[in-house]
Amino acid sequence: MAVPYVINLDKSPDRWSAIQETWKGVFPIQRISAVERSPGWIGCGLSHVKAVKEAKERNDKWVLVWEDDCVPRKRNGEPMNVRVVQKLWNDVLQALETRMGEWDIMLGATSRIIGAPIHKKWTNDVGVQIFSLPKGFTAHWILYNQSIYDKIIAWETTLASPIDVYMYDVARVFVPLPFLAEQRPCYSFIEGGERNYEEWFNSAEKALQTFLTPGELSIRQPSIDTRFSVTNLPKPQGKTVTHLFS
C-alpha cells in the first residue's frame, strides 16, 4: 500500500484535522509541512517537490502525495465510502506494480481532459480502468513513481509553470475510471478565494467514459459496494468528447 503524505500549511490545522477525520481507519495518512510561497502555485509545487525529495532519500519505489482538500469522489451527491476508494486504489496499485517501467504518475482524478486519453488494458476483472492522460489538471492526489523523482525535483530550478502543468511535459501520466477523489469546496490558497471544482470533475469523468468501447468493461465489480462501479457512472450526453476546457 502507498501511504498518503498530505501537504498541509502550518497555519491550517483545521484542514489537517478535517482530512484526518475523512480518511481515518482506512488510509494511514502522514503530514508534511507545506511550503508557503507566493504566488500559491509555487508554494504548492515546492511542497510536492519536498515530498518527492523525502521519498527519494528513503529510497521509496513510489510516493503518494495528497493535498489537504482531498476527499472521496461523490456519487449521486454523496461521498464514496472510503473503503470503496481503498479497494479500487489497491486494484490500481496491483496493476501498476507489475508495470513499473511503463508509467511515471498516477492521479486519483483530473478536473480537465485535454487531448484523447488511451484506455490501457492493465486491469482484468476489477471495477476500475486505467487511462493514459495527454494533459489534464489538478494535483490533489498524485502517485509519483521513482522513475520521475529527479524530473519533479528539477522543477524547482525553473518554476516555469504550475507543477500540474509541468508534469505533462516530462512524465507519462495516468488516471483511473472511476475517479477516486475530488477537492473539497474550500478556500484556495493558489487562486485566492473560495472554489468548488465538483462540476469540473463531473464533466471530466463523463468525458473519460466516452473512451471506453463496448466489451472492454469488466463484468465483476468490487463486492464491497457495487453502486459505485464504472458501469454505474452517469452517461455522457454526446457520443464523442475529445477534450474539455482548452
Image (spheres, rainbow, N blue to C red):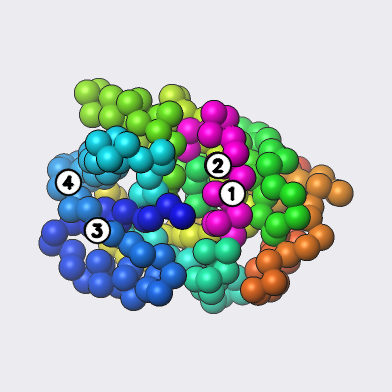
Residue 246, visible in the rendered structure: no
Tag 4: residue type? Val
Looking at the image, which residue is at 43% across and 29% down?
147
The residue that label 4 is drawn on is: 35
Q: Nearer the viewer, mark 4 or mark 2?
A: 2
Residue located 75% across and 55% down the image = 125
- Answer above or below: position of 136 versus 25: above
Query: Looking at the image, do the residues carrying marks 1 and 4 touch, with CB atoms under 8 Å apart?
Result: no
Task: Answer with the quarter of the image where residue 179 lies.
Answer: bottom right
| Marks 2 and 1, how far apart at CA | 5 Å
Secondary structure category for the residue under label 1: helix
Task: For marks 2 and 3, give the CA distance.
Answer: 25 Å
- Magenta extent: 88-105
Residue matched to label 3 = 31
Residue 20 image offset from top left, x and y in percent: 31, 70
Q: Which mark is residue 180?
A: none
Residue 235, quarter of picture: bottom right
Q: Label 3's element? A: strand
User: Callout 1: 10 Å neighbours few (<14), some, many (20+)?
Assistant: few
| Residue underneath mark 2 | 97
Nearest-to-viewer mark from 2 and 3: 2
The residue tagged 1 is 94
What secondary structure is the magenta-colored segment mainly? Answer: helix
